[in-house]
Image (spheres, helix red, strand yellow):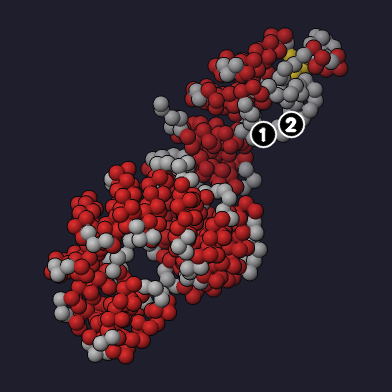
Amino acid sequence: MYSRQFVKLRNLNSILLMMSLLLGFTLTGCATHSEKAQYPNQHENSDGHSDAVSGASQENMSTKNSSPQTGTTQIKAGEPAQELTPELLYDLMLAELALQRNDYTLAFDKYYKAAEQTRDSRLAKKATRVTLFSKDDAQTFKAVKLWSEIQPENIDVQQIYASSLISQKKDEEALLYLQKVINLSDNFEAGFKRAFTILETVEEQKRANILFVRLTKNHQNEPMVKLYQAKLAFKFVDYPSTEKYLDEALASKPGYLDALVLKVELLKKQNRELQAIQTLEKILLKLPQNTAIRLELARLLVKNKQYEQGLKQVKQLAKKELAPEVLFAISLLAIEMDKLDEARQYLERLHAHRLYASEAAYFIGQLEAGRENYAEAEEWFKRVKNGKYTFEAYLGLVMVYSQQEKFDQAFKLLEHSSGYNGKQSTEILQIKAEVYAQAKNYTKAYEIYTEAVNLAPDNHDILYGRAMLAEKFGRIDLLEKDLHTILAANPKDNQALNALGYTLADRTTRYQEALQYIERALKLNPDDVATLDSMGWVLYKMGKHAEALKYLQKAYEKDPDPEIAAHYGEILWVSGQTKKAKSIWDKALKKDPQHRVLIGTRTRYLKK
């Protein structure tokens, strides 16, 4: 039976961290670098200071802000207060103009000079911001250092400076500032979590571990510290250490949810999924309303073929008002469990979300096409108007037209496929060939497959499709040629091995050669239904009926496919079990009344 159907970069982590901590400090484009002038007016920002000068004019310098002693405007930005001298105002305006021209070097120079002079934190912040666009590491570190000196009690600034020191591998100094971040926080746990985001950027495990141990010197037995030690080990794919630290954390604090969640991830990485399931069940006892945990549990249950338990979790999820992403996930899980009616219900709920309507329509179309409800599948495929499944829906529509023998409509749709190219063009050619084959125009179908092979000579799916087409019009030599091409490139392609073995068993008398190919395929995939059927069939052809019956019975029990039913019934018949053979054939005919092999086999024996 056949089975295949169809410039040197900066320290990125450090830079991203810096950018995320520059609170409220966002560039909106080269043409809009200038900020609205708020300074010297007394508008307070999050730092508790008035905003820095930008685009200042004579109108900004009202007499109410003038110093009676000097007649110049006071900068009330940092400590101590500074005067807005003409020279300073000129430098700030020049910096803004430089920004608009993308002259980051000049802009940095002027902002940094102004920040040094005024000790204004926002100017130091602006200087730092400019360096993130100029990508000058030296300037960044210089600016952040100044900023941290100006605002020694600002935890965000100290965190940024610690990050800059880590990126320069100045670990001793970095530790001082990481400790400062912890000390400025409300408590050790909050501060350490901040510090840990910086430790995670270290790329060398030994170095990261040393920094970690030194930073947690007086807290190493705390469960939270053990958890973060596990996280660090997990980052470096050090799974034994991850497990050790997690076990220590859970021993000190049984039921520690964060540790249990990380343990699930660890167990999945180690392919210990049954233990991961048990851990997720423990978490759900504490967090029964957690959708993400329940969804992950359902996914693992289905993956491990615990379908009833998986369905129970899916139904629990379905009772709630779910986000579209969760509805989509549980619908796919239901399809995997072959609970197609439930899957259809979830997909219809998803279809009600406007942004997911096309996506849901595509999967409903696929589901109904799989159930051979081709007319309904056609209607759903037509509802796919946009999104990432538009092309797939287009191909699906062509195929359901073909299955309904609406060949004119299928070919008409294929005529409008010129807009697709590359990989999609070969897929279109495959579909076009399959439509011609469905219409029994095998010569035309073979020509199109050959065109596709010429476009993608290394595409084994296309070669396999052409080989299967050659079998339909009796050109076993062409089938062998394409399948041997596949096997020359990949000797472990079990589907090609099986197809070659089955064809030789079914269409020639080269049974011993066929047996060798099928044995190789079965060794690669012992549970493959198509290969089990092929093995039974070749053994039957070789006269080994008792052995053949075992394989065919196993294949039929796994999948009562009409072709398997035809083979299984035939060997039952010749073995004297005619009543059972007829029952199997009749049952298969109800499933597929037009199946050529099944009808031929049944007719041949019932006429005797």
Answer yes or no: is residue 589 visible. Answer: yes
Answer yes or no: is residue 226 visible. Answer: no
Q: Which residue is mark 1?
A: 24
Q: Give the SS element for disc 1.
A: loop
Instruction: Locate residue 169, reporting x and y percent.
Output: 43, 32
Rate crowding at label 2 as few (under 14), some (14 to 19) or many (20 or more) other CA atoms within 10 Å.
few
Separation (CA) of disc 2 from disc 1: 10 Å
Q: Quadrant of the C terminus?
A: bottom left
- Circles 2 and 1, Cβ within 8 Å, touching? The answer is yes
Q: Which residue type carries mark 2?
A: Asn
Of labels 2 and 1, earlier in sequence is: 1
Q: Quadrant of residue 364?
A: bottom right
* Closer-to-camera residue (144/407): 407
Q: Quadrant of residue 248?
A: bottom left
Above or below, 558 against 127 in this view is below
Count of numbered circles on the image = 2
Q: Which residue is mark 2?
A: 45
Q: Which residue type carries mark 1?
A: Gly
Q: Quadrant of residue 273?
A: bottom left
At 43% across and 58% down in the image, what residue appears? 266
Above or below, 564 against 184 in this view is below
Q: Give the SS element for disc 2.
A: loop
Above or below, 152 against 90 in this view is below
Instruction: Locate residue 466, reporting x and y percent.
Output: 29, 55
At 17% across and 67% down in the image, what residue appears? 508
At 80% across and 25% down in the image, what residue appears? 42
Nearest to the eye among marks 2 and 1: give it: 1
At 49% across and 31% down in the image, what residue appears? 165
Left or right: where does residue 484 sit relative to residue 426? left
